[in-house]
Each structure stands twice: as structure tokens, then as C-alpha cells.
Amino acid sequence: MKILEKTFKTPLGIVHCGLQSGVSDIVQIESTIYKNGKSEILKTGAHQIEIIEFKLNHEVTVADSSAWIWRIEKTNELTEIIETYCFFEKGDTNVELDSANGEHLDAIEIYNNDWTLHIGTEDGDMMHNRATADDWLPIRLAANIDISHPITLAQENGFSTIIPDLKKGEQIHIQYLSAYDKRDIDKINTWLAVDRSKNELELWLRIR
């Protein structure tokens, strides 16, 4: 069941970023304003979930961008299956999609003759590094997450992440970034815009 979804309209189509689960007892308990973004905080029977929505910073110039961070904490030992996602819905039948991965980045490129859009997220290697550092990924999961065993799965038109079975007090950070601009095959600005680390995003948002 779809619990919450945000959308970003682009000249190529719509980017959908959301959360789905079988849970029904969910309430919004708080909202927060960050330096360069805003968030909603939700509570389910077993999790507290914050979604932060923001524009990417201007280190790389693009026509427009939209990005989302999911910060999820397990609040008790109940079992809940939660999935986050970020998918592209075509608005133009002439749109092409292709993989555009990089170091520590899983990304897809969506384009036509006029526009280029990239959607990116951390790859399994980056998540393994964060788990090893106990950085918003439990250290006990480090052995189970790597480039060949990611928790975020790539699909033709986007990404989905089934949240691991966390223990009470454990937290997880998932990010999905999108940016578009006029198409220029000699430029990679939209790809660079979505190639951002968790720490870079937190500094931009002034989370810590």
C-alpha cells in the first residue's frame, strides 16, 4: 500500500519518490524546516520515518532538481515491511532510458533530443562503507551489503529499497536525487548533480 509519495515534474515526465508498506496505522507527528529543505516525520507501529525534500545545491548548474532523503528508525521489535522507491514515469513516448552508474553511484539517464534527466542513489559499495562506519546503517549489516548485494535495486525506470529488518534503535538513510537540463552530449552536469554523498547532502541541508 502506498503511504506517501512526492512528485517532480520534468519536461521528460514525472519522477515519483515514495514509501509503501502493508501498515495502516500511520500518523504524521511533526514537520521540520532545514536550511535548504523541509521534512515530514511519520510514525508507524514500528518505525519513525522522516522524508526530507530539497533542491540540490548550485555547485553544478542544472535547469532544476529535486531530491529526497529517507531517515528511518526502528522504534520497537514489531515486524513491518517498508519499501522506498524512486521511479520515472514517461511523459514523452520518444524518451530513452539507460544505465549511468559511477563509483559509489547507481544512476539512470533519461533523455530525448531536447532534455537530459538523471536519477541517482548510493550503490551497494557506498552503503557497505557506511555500515562499516556505523553511519546511519547498522554495522551488523556490513557483511551482507556490498556492490554485488545492494539493498537498493535498480530497475529500468528507477530504484526501490526494501528496508532491512532493523533492531530497536537502529537507523537507516536512503537517498534519491534527480536533476535535469537542456540536452548537450558534451556535458555531464546532471549526472554530477546526482553524484552526491550523504555527508555532502547533510552539510547542504545543515542537518548537523
Image (spheres, helix red, strand yellow):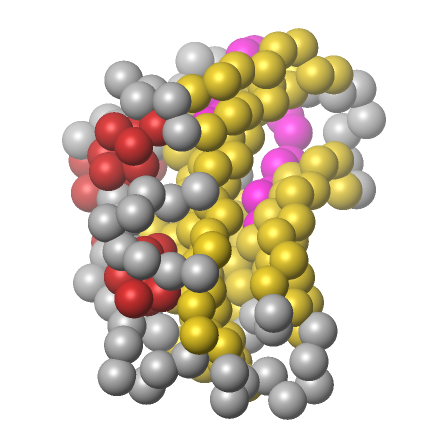
From this viewpoint, is residue 131 visible?
no
Q: Residue at x 50, y 48 (%)?
A: 66
Name above or below for residue 108 compared with residue 16: below
The percent position of residue 123, horizontal first and vertical second, equals: 32, 56
Residue closest to the eye, 76 or 155 = 155
Left/right placement of residue 128 relative to residue 29 reads left
The percent position of residue 42, horizontal first and vertical second, equals: 64, 20
Name above or below for residue 83 compared with residue 146: above
Left/right placement of residue 68 relative to residue 17 reads left
Residue closest to the eye, 112 or 155 = 112
Magenta stretch in the rendered image: 71-85
Quadrant, the C terminus: top left
Q: Residue at x 46, y 52 (%)?
A: 65
Is residue 47 a member of the stretch shown in magenta? no
The percent position of residue 135, horizontal first and vertical second, equals: 26, 28
Q: How many marks?
A: 0
From this viewpoint, is residue 49 visible?
yes
Left/right placement of residue 144 relative to residue 176 reads left
Quadrant, the N terminus: top right
Residue closest to the eye, 19 or 80 = 19
Q: Quadrant of residue 128?
A: top left
Q: Residue at x 64, y 89 (%)?
A: 94
The percent position of residue 25, horizontal first and vertical second, equals: 79, 19
Q: Residue at x 71, y 36 (%)?
A: 4
